[in-house]
Image (tube, coloured by chain):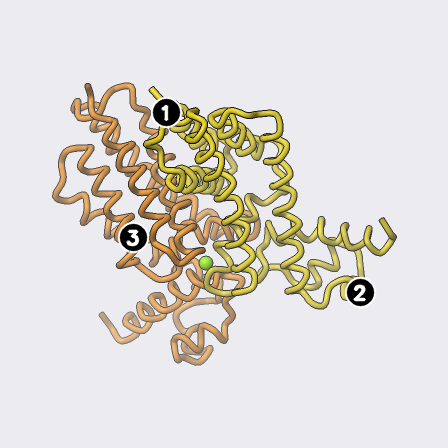
Chain colours: A orange, B yellow
Amino acid sequence: MSKGQETKERILQQTAELFNKQGYAGTSMSDIMQVTGLKKGGIYNHFQNKDELALQAFDYAVSLISYRYRIALLSKRNAIERLQGIVQVFVSYIDKPPLKGGCPLLNTAVESDHTHPALRKRAQEAMNSWYDMIRRVVQKGIRRGEISSDIDPEQVATVTIAIFEGGLMMTQLHDDPIYLKRAMTHLSQYIESFSPR
Amino acid sequence: MSKGQETKERILQQTAELFNKQGYAGTSMSDIMQVTGLKKGGIYNHFQNKDELALQAFDYAVSLISYRYRIALLSKRNAIERLQGIVQVFVSYIDKPPLKGGCPLLNTAVESDHTHPALRKRAQEAMNSWYDMIRRVVQKGIRRGEISSDIDPEQVATVTIAIFEGGLMMTQLHDDPIYLKRAMTHLSQYIESFSPR
Ligand SMILES: [Mg+2]
Ligand SMILES: [Mg+2]
């Protein structure tokens, strides 16, 4: 990696966390300069403007999360085990969050939905690809007879994401892991019920 | 209501929706002036500063929601029916949201948790009182034999709020009611499973 690429990567890393904690509207250029230790020109060398940086920082944050899912799914073939592996990634947010400040997808979705069309579109795409990953695990599980055929893959993808995001929000708000843990206990039991009888 | 109180009420109404859509950091004094049609002085007559207005606008938004729960619970005695009544309030966000921009509790929780201690405290209190309402419905249901005694009231309160907030976030992000509907189908089935066998 060239020196320029290294600097760019470091800016993305530092600002992804800053945006995740403070939001896009709540993060100023001077916050960005402070956290990176760079002057305005040093940042604009790599990104046209704050918006361009925000979009790339979001993609960077999403890549950190996607990586965890890929690792978690790598060693598991059975669909129920794969879904439980996803739950374990969710649980890992308690002790080893991919980045500080909660889930970048939730944070960005909530902030952008009425204010920032470009960022919202990114959040929609990230949500769709996450959703499709879960949906496909369920579909494949049904085809292989590992999951009962009366389970609706769209329903599972929706419930899985909803309960994780809601539980994580409660844990972030109260700074208490119990909420996400309870949400994950429920999700895990729900997934166990998919086995064909 | 005096003229002054009427103006204050109207400012709260208009800015509650504005904050709910744009966030606190994303809402400027000039946005507030524009939506209320008032000059800065006209707003400062009623609120010391933007922060004071934000806190009161949040309380106002929460009062709109609490009102719906009170109405929904008024006519129902059985605990399972009461919980399903709460689900019906959630479903009503699709066609008749209490205010535009999604759930003020979710929005405020996500925005304030790492940035705004006073607003975060308000969100924590609102979350606690909502949580306690659900928890108490379950506890009373268990005492009355309407809900199986192996159901954990804290678990139910957590799952109920998490799945609603997560489902609503997805619906807001995609501007599609299907996500909240699916989340509510799941919640409703979960609640039905509480009946003693
Ligand atoms: Mg929003
Ligand atoms: Mg936050």
Residue corresponding to mark 1: B193
Q: In the figure, B156 relative to B55: above or below?
A: above
Q: Residue at x 80, y 67 (%)?
A: B41
Residue toward you, B53 or B194: B194
* Residue at the disc numbered 3: A65
Q: Secondary structure at mark 2?
A: loop
Counting other residues with Cα less than 10 Å from the Cα at mark 3, is it few (<14), some (14-19), or many (20 or more)?
Answer: many
Q: Furthest-front residue in view?
A: B143
The location of residue B155, given as percent across then percent down, is 37, 40
The picture places residue A116, in percent across and down from the top left corner, at 53, 53
- Label 1 vs label 3: CA separation? 34 Å
Between B111 and B157, the one nearer to me in the picture: B157
* Nearest to the observer: residue A38 or residue B121: B121
Q: Residue at x 45, y 53 (%)?
A: A108
Q: Identify the residue under disc 2.
A: B45
The quadrant in which residue B154 appears is top left
Which amino acid lies under the numbered mark 3 shown in the image of this protein?
A: Ile
**Same-chain check, marks 2 and 1:** yes
Q: Position of residue A93 (x, y in %)?
A: 30, 54
Residue A117 seen in the current view: no
> Helix, strand, or loop for circle 3?
helix
The three-letter code of the residue at mark 2 reads Asn
**What residue is at 23 percent from the left and 21 percent from the top?**
A148
Asked if residue A85 lies left or right of residue A51, the reply is left
Query: Can you say which quadrant of the picture contains the C terminus of chain B?
Result: top left
Question: Which amino acid type is shown beneath numbered disc 1?
Answer: Ser
Q: Residue at x 46, y 38 (%)?
A: B164
Q: Viewer-nearest of labels 2 and 1? A: 1
